[in-house]
Image (tube, rainbow, N blue to C red):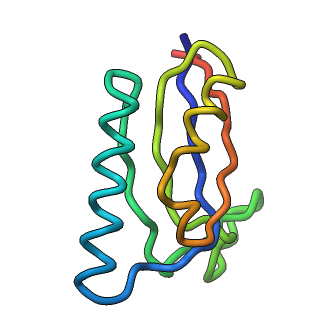
Amino acid sequence: MADYVLLYSGGKMPEGKEEQDAVMAAWTAWFGELGGGLKDGGNPFTPGAKTIGSDGSVSDGGGTASGYSILTADSLDEAVAKAKGCPVLQGGASITVYETFAVM
């Protein structure tokens, strides 16, 4: 088993109470499907970001990332299969799945 970071890019926030409730219900259902494989449900990112260069310089802004989740799976393919059920896709976002490994 390994941990996988699902990095969300783009998409839109739900508008209005009805749409917000529907999106939250979809997230709750997906989290339930993942069960013990969900390590960190994550959160969306705000637009506020800073980028630090290798020379230590700091600039405003970041990439296109809009949020994340972390899950546990037996393989990258399994993590991708689980990610396909993520409600963020319904809002027009894309997901990049990264395998992590423990170094400490």
Question: 3 or 50, which lies in front?
Answer: 3
Residue 68 as seen in the image, left or right of residue 79: left
Q: Position of residue 96 (x, y in %)?
A: 69, 48
Question: 104 or 93, which lies in front?
Answer: 93
Q: How many numbered marks does the figure carry? A: 0
| Farthest residue, direction bottom | 16
Residue 51 sits in quarter? bottom right
Residue visible at 61% across and 83% down in the picture: 60
Residue 6 as seen in the image, left or right of residue 80: left
For the N terminus, the quadrant is top right
Q: With respect to residue 39, does 27 lie above or below?
A: below
Residue 20 sits in quarter? bottom left
Question: 54 or 83, which lies in front?
Answer: 83
Q: Position of residue 74 (x, y in %)?
A: 59, 13
Residue visible at 69% across and 24% down in the picture: 76
Question: 99 or 34, which lies in front?
Answer: 34
Q: Position of residue 67 (x, y in %)?
A: 50, 60
Residue 41 as seen in the image, left or right of residue 98: left
Residue 97 sits in quarter? top right
Q: Position of residue 7 (x, y in %)?
A: 60, 51
Q: With respect to residue 97, does 71 lie above or below?
A: above
Residue visible at 35% across and 66% down in the picture: 23
